[in-house]
Image: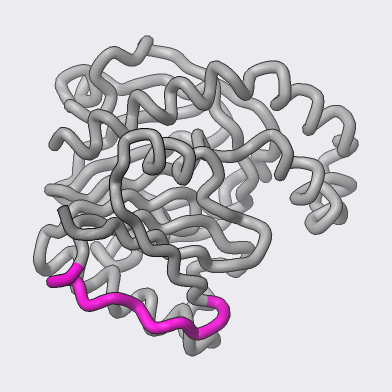
């Protein structure tokens, strides 16, 4: 099997428990730190792409050379219908590449939430063996519209569009991969955003720590489904 390309787009937002999953399943992978201008792999040399989060808005990707290169790769992924999993920013940049709008959500979502599968998701292999409603972690202000021809797979109360699929490309607005040890680091790094919505580091980190084992299990289940396809 060819390696899986993981695009890490800022120092703090790592692949988390995805790395643990890949090691347990003995799946080869390569992490590219795009923010360091590390070269992206030729798509012919990789099995799939996992594109992670980034604090920069997709609306401003063209102001950063490394994000311009990343956007170009995502457009090529779409053209080739390569297996792709975009998480948060990674999902938003996929939506943009597919011609959909990305912009501010009505509220900033930070912390533990629940999302629900749509009727279309009940027949989608990505969410096989998932409950209709399940816990996730959020840290985002923007949201994507569902691109033309894509299937809307998950929705939330405060942010309607939480997941979609177009061919072999999947976008998630939520996080299942976050290691609970990283949440306090995010809280320190993005503390102004916590203050803006009236939450504390202890509240966000404590709430996620309580659900983290269940979220990790869901992440492994989703990745099993993704790689089976």
Residue at image location 18% in from the left, 64% down from the top: 78
- Residue 112 at least partly seen: yes
- Nearest to the observer: residue 204 or residue 1: 1
Residue at image location 42% in from the left, 20% down from the top: 116
Question: What range of the chain is rendered magenta?
Answer: 35-45
Where is residue 106 drawn, in percent x and y? Answer: 61, 44
Q: Is residue 212 above or below residue 31?
A: above
Where is residue 74 drawn, in percent x and y? Answer: 28, 69
- Nearest to the observer: residue 111 or residue 177: 177
Quadrant of the frame with the C terminus: top left
Q: Is residue 221 above or below residue 168?
A: above
Task: Classify residue 16 by image quadrant.
Answer: top right
- Residue 95 at least partly seen: no
Residue at image location 36% in from the left, 12% down from the top: 132
Task: Classify residue 212 by image quadrant.
Answer: top right
| 101 left or right of 188 in image | left
Where is residue 90 drawn, in percent x and y? Answer: 42, 57
Q: Is residue 113 above or below residue 26?
A: above
Where is residue 117 drawn, in percent x and y? Answer: 34, 21
- Nearest to the observer: residue 3 or residue 69: 3
Residue at image location 15% in from the left, 20% down from the top: 123
Residue 41 belongs to magenta span: yes
Residue 159 belongs to magenta span: no
């Amino acid at each position: 099997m060819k390696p899986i390309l993981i695009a890490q787009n800022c120092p703090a937002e790592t692949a988390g428990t995805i790395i643990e999953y890949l090691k347990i399943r003995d799946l080869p992978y390569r992490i590219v730190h795009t923010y360091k201008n590390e070269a992206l792999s030729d798509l012919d040399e990789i099995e799939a792409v996992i594109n992670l989060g980034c604090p920069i808005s997709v609306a401003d990707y063209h102001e950063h050379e490394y994000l311009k290169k990343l956007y170009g790769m995502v457009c090529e992924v779409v053209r080739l219908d390569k297996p792709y999993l975009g998480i948060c920013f990674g999902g938003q940049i996929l939506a943009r590449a597919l011609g959909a709008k990305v912009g501010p959500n009505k509220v900033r979502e930070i912390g533990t939430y629940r999302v629900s599968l749509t009727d279309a998701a009940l027949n989608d292999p990505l969410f096989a063996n998932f409950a209709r409603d399940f816990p996730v972690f959020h840290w985002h202000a923007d949201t994507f519209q569902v691109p033309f021809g894509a299937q809307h797979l998950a929705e939330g109360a405060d942010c309607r569009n939480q997941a979609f699929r177009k061919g072999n490309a999947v976008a998630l607005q939520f996080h299942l991969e976050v290691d609970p040890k990283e949440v306090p680091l995010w809280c320190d790094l993005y503390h102004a955003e916590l203050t803006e919505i009236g939450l504390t580091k202890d509240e966000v980190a404590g709430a996620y720590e309580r659900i983290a084992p269940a979220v990790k299990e869901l992440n492994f289940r989703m990745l099993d489904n993704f790689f089976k396809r």
